[in-house]
Image (tube, rainbow, N blue to C red):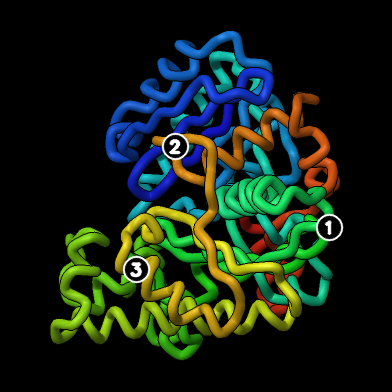
Amino acid sequence: MGVDPGTKSFDFCGLDDGELFVDSTIPSEEVMTEPRLVLELLRSAMPLDLIAGPSGYGLPITHISKIDDKKLFLMVLTKPDDKAREGIIGLRRVVKALKEENFNVFFTPGVVHMPTVPTHRKANRIDMGTADKLCCAILGIFDQARHYKIGYKETSFILVEMGYGYNAVLGIDGGRIVDGIGGTTGGIGFLSLGGMDGELAYLLNKFDKSTLRQGGAAYIAGDERITPEEFAERAHDGRYNLAWKAFMEGVEKGVAQMHVSVREPKEILLSGRLCRVKRIYDELSNRLSDLGEVRKVEGFAKVAKEAAQGAALLADGLAGGRYKELIDAMNIKEAGGTVLDNIYLKAIGELRLRYGA
């Protein structure tokens, strides 16, 4: 079973001997209010050999029995005094409940943990792609290998993952993740401002984590409650057009940047909540066509998002199932380190001590 804790929904995707048998979703708002909904869904699918759990910024493959406050902090990266911790508290409650029920859950890495990403690309980076974005890359490798009838190690592409909150651009070469631009370091997302200007961060001084989920396309448009579908329909109107241009150009620049790390990708793959909106997909396909062939990731589930499908493939591979070869080819079991290992600021030592990391 793979679990994806998305901005809008928690998605669940289960494989039995490689065949889909769970394809479900629960609104994130409901999970934050009642975390036991997750347990109830998992119980209904028992017996389960292995669950790839909601991992945030990720950890090297870690069993839930090994999760303590330090590791939980490294997954969520939220300070104890943050005023906007409701969502994180909900995730903590989910993890605690899973641990109390003795579910066989493993937490999984983010892009920065991967040994296949050269160390110099990790310099001063934390968010190169969260654990769920890595799972989207797993699905992308699976999809391209199936589409072209090639081996996993022959796959090569640039992945654009557009969630409801954040975007990410990942580079895959030789069936391995070699680079990533995460949702808080790249162009704007639908909700998030993307990479924050350092001078702006300085002027804001202390700010809570909810700030990272503001300033995106919906906020530029002046309509933070708008849906992606409504946004696309109004793309040529006033501030909506401003937001549209900023969003699209941010994706285009991210893909162009990733060409430095993956110089000859077979294609550019699009995935995520926003690429299901036809007008958004069509616009990006047109814009990115000069940079390579563009195609939408074709998963195997109808309800669960791409990240949950990739997490299911990961769980299957870790359990020694049909997709073990895929997970082995990506070197996911060799992931290591922490998200704070590659920061070269004087203050990082104090931060590590303060948070026990």
**Quarter of the figure with the N terminus:** top right
Among the two numbered marks 1 and 2 on one chain, the one whose residue lies closer to the N terminus? 1
Residue 264 figure quarter: bottom right
Look at the image and tell me whether residue 357 can be seen: no
Q: Amino acid at mark 3?
A: Ile
Among the two numbered marks 3 and 1 on one chain, the one whose residue lies closer to the N terminus? 1
| Residue wearing tag 2 | 304
Kindly identify the residue that appears in the image at 40 percent across and 60 percent down: 275
| Residue wearing tag 1 | 115
| Residue wearing tag 3 | 280
Q: Residues within 10 Å of mark 3 (few under 14, many from 20)?
A: some
Look at the image and tell me whether residue 11 can be seen: yes
Q: Looking at the picture, does residue 53 appear above or below residue 144?
A: above
Could you say where residue 240 lies in the image, as x and y percent from the top left?
A: 20, 79
Total numbered badges shown on the rendered structure: 3
Viewer-nearest residue: 4 or 354? 4
User: Of discs 3 and 1, which sits in the foreground?
Assistant: 3
